[in-house]
Amino acid sequence: MAIKTTISLIKCDVGSLAGHYIVPKPLLNIAEKNLKQAEETGLINSYYVFNAGDDLQLLMVHQKGESDPEIHRLAYSTFREAADKALELKLYGAGQDLLKDAFSGNIRGMGPGVAEMEIEERGADPIVIFAADKTSAGAFNFPLFRIFADPMNTAGLVIDPNMAGGFKFEVMDTMDNTKVTLKTPEETYDLIALIGTVQRYMVSRVWRATDNLICATGSVTRLSQIAGKYVGKDDPVMITRAQHGLPAVGEILVPFMHSYLVEGWMRGSHWGPIMPVGLKDSKCTAFDGPPRLVALGFQVSNGKIACDDTGKPMIADMFDDPAFDIARREAQELACTLRRMGEFEPARLGPEEMEYTTLQQTLEKLKERFKPA
Ligand code: 13P
Ligand code: 13P
Ligand code: MG
Ligand code: MG
């Protein structure tokens, strides 16, 4: 029997330094302390704490399965403790994404973002996780399509018979709270018809069609729907699995050689160019952006993240590489082009998404001054 291992990536904006810039060290330290303790007591087998801009990211590898109450409680109590520290330090937006107070066994729906994947370990299991800041889960629709369904991106779809059976995409309708599964290549056009609408339809899972092997899972929360108003962007996370009849790591990364536009950026109210960066540049500055994306690679090995000789998990900072310089350059250029347009659409989001923001108060103020024309 193959070992069953779960990868949980749970994130939360608990408060940040200098506006919505980064998670500062004292908050990372709290996460490090709590996860280390959980590793010592055997609740988790491995962990890695990092930040995607102002979002605190807990990567945990364990054998408790998905949606485990103990794992979720660990994440929740860590975010709570970090938010209290943020409050004490008067950091910006302390506890921003902790929208609900009473934890009752699952952190989903409380504000933090969750991506979890239970796998049966193969001979070698390469994983790539993604974490974005200043955008929403729809930002992953385009690259997920390219990775698992576009033969011009993923050579394996053409060359590797183990991938020729195609992939199945679970798509969430975040407006109606329903979901549908579509199969590529047969339903490619229908899939694009849905997930091209990135503000409403979001890919939540992908499986290999021939044997239902799980190969990608993302967080699809809409904070504005939980809170009923704009409180911050969802800043999604995603887990992908690679090689041996799945897209290669290089095929998972190649869509990011070019920038593309995503919703988010300043006040979550603008289209902005995604900028793939190494961890050292995982911070948002100009107009609270441009939206950043980090990608970390590792091997899952006997229920853990494969470690070096000193017992430290080996983590590859995949976008810390000149191969993505052009994407970063494009992001800068697109950012300048869009910002020249100021608050005029399409630089600013359309009216449906703006309904959740403070723009409503401005429009309300003008309401009674309108006369029949
Ligand atoms: P303030 O109203 O605190 O300036 O917040 C604006 C903001 O950052 C929106 O997310
Ligand atoms: P975050 O969602 O990253 O907190 O950003 C909020 C924001 O309004 C930035 O301008
Ligand atoms: Mg924030
Ligand atoms: Mg954020």
Image: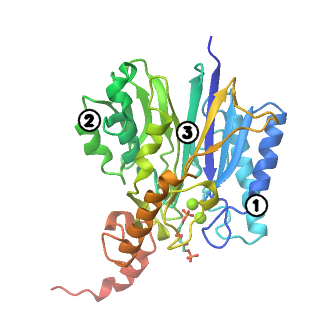
Residue 128: mark: 3
**Observer-nearest residue: 84 or 89?**
89
The answer to the question of whether label 2 and label 3 lie on touching residues, with beta carbons closer than 8 A, is no
- Identify the residue at image location x=61%, y=34%: 67
Q: Is residue 214 something that shows in the picture?
A: yes
Can you identify the residue that label 2 sits on? Answer: 188
Residue drawn 38% across the image and 57% down it? 260
Ligand 2 location (quadrant): bottom right
Does 359 appear above or below 321?
Answer: below
Which label belongs to residue 78?
Answer: none
Residue furthest left in the image = 373
* Identity of the residue drawn at 77% across and 70% down: 89
Q: Earlier in the sequence, mark 2 or mark 1?
A: 1
> Is 266 displayed left or right of 82 in the figure?
left
Under mark 1, the amino acid is: Lys
83 or 324: nearer the viewer? 324
Q: Residue furthest top?
A: 1
Q: Does dot 2 land on a helix, a strand or a loop?
A: helix
Colour scheme of the rendered structure: rainbow
Q: Which residue is mark 1?
A: 25
Please give left or right for residue 256 compared with residue 66 in the image: left
